[in-house]
């Protein structure tokens, strides 16, 4: 799993811009990619997919807890909201959903680009899951999509560290944690219809879902 993250981050950092007087040639992407560790991914995931988050069902208290967790992490990394101030939530109204779903929210955080700030790279995952059954058994959703969501936190950390050293990304990066995926891709639909940055400025979207599994080619060590 780590290799996937390191590869992605190294690839992306290669396109980083430089803020004077630092030059792009000075960047060793691995300095920052190495901040993505299996230990930290596990620490995040063991909280994010814990029973305490009650399976993160859209509109339910567990999902709200998960949203707060994401916001707190972005704030601690000093990654700002593109919405403004302390508001990291894009409200998704209950009218978007079929059936009895309370209001929910996408969580957004943003690193402005240094050279082409009007070009936006979106890195996204859904942070909701399917909640609990009638007996109170929690569907933890560690892989779906706790894995993609904590990966975004670690990617965000790497970019935040690079920026602190003067290597902000050339293009702006929007970390987009969407809600309501399990209800029919509702959070991503809502963002697409109500983008914070014009879709014409959005140059790419890397969406991450269920990367926690191993297969025959990637045996556990
Ligand atoms: Zn999923």
Image (cartoon, rainbow, N blue to C red):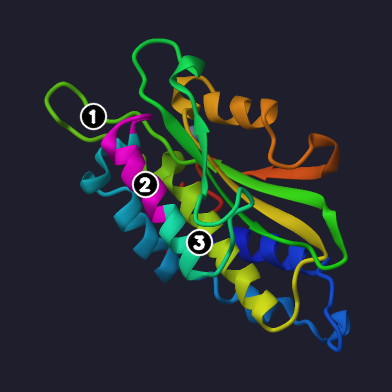
Q: Position of residue 66 (x, y in %)?
A: 36, 47
Residue 100's place in the image compared with 148, above or below, is above
Residue 132 badge: 1
Q: Earlier in the sequence, mark 1 or mark 3?
A: 3
Q: Secondary structure at mark 3?
A: helix
Q: Position of residue 51 (x, y in %)?
A: 21, 45
- Asked if residue 68 is among those painted magenta in the image, a careful observer would answer yes
Q: Position of residue 188 (x, y in %)?
A: 60, 30
- The residue mark sitting in front, 2 or 1, is 2
Q: Nearer the viewer, residue 220 or 52?
A: 52
Disc 2 to disc 3, C-alpha distance? 13 Å
Q: Earlier in the sequence, mark 2 or mark 3?
A: 2
Q: Position of residue 89 (x, y in %)?
A: 50, 43
- Left or right, residue 41 beside residue 217: left
Q: Label 2 neighbourhood size at 10 Å, few (<14), some (14-19), many (20+)?
A: many
Residue under the image location 62 percent in, 58 percent down: 4
Residue 74 badge: 3
Q: Is residue 144 visible?
A: yes
Predominant SS of the magenta segment: helix
Which range is magenta?
57-69
- Left or right, residue 19 beside residue 126: right
- Asked if residue 114 is among those painted magenta in the image, a careful observer would answer no
Q: Secondary structure at mark 1?
A: loop
Residue under the image location 59 percent in, 61 percent down: 80
Residue furthest front in the image: 85
Residue 142's place in the image compared with 29, above or below, is above
Disc 1 to disc 3, C-alpha distance? 27 Å
Which residue in the structure is indicated by mark 2?
66
Q: Label 3 neighbourhood size at 10 Å, few (<14), some (14-19), many (20+)?
A: many
Residue under the image location 75 percent in, 72 percent down: 168
């Amino acid at each position: 799993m780590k290799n996937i993250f390191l590869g992605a981050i190294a690839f992306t950092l290669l396109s980083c811009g430089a803020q004077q007087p630092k030059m792009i040639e000075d960047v060793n992407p691995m300095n920052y990619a190495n901040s993505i560790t299996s230990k930290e991914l596990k620490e995040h995931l063991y909280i994010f997919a814990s029973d305490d988050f009650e399976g993160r069902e859209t509109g339910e208290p567990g999902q709200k807890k998960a949203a707060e967790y994401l916001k707190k992490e972005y704030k601690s990394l000093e990654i700002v909201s593109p919405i403004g101030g302390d508001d990291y939530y894009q409200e998704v109204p209950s009218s978007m959903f079929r059936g009895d779903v309370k209001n929910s929210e996408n969580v957004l955080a943003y690193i402005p680009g240094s050279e082409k700030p009007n070009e936006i790279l979106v890195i996204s995952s859904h942070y909701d899951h399917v909640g609990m059954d009638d007996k109170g058994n929690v569907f933890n959703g560690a892989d779906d999509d706790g894995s993609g969501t904590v990966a975004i936190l670690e990617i965000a950390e790497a970019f935040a560290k690079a920026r602190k050293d003067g290597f902000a990304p050339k293009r702006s990066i929007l970390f987009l944690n969407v809600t309501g995926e399990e209800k029919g891709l509702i959070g991503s639909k809502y963002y697409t219809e109500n983008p914070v940055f014009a879709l014409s400025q959005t140059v790419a979207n890397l969406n991450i879902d269920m990367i926690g599994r191993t297969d025959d080619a990637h045996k556990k060590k």
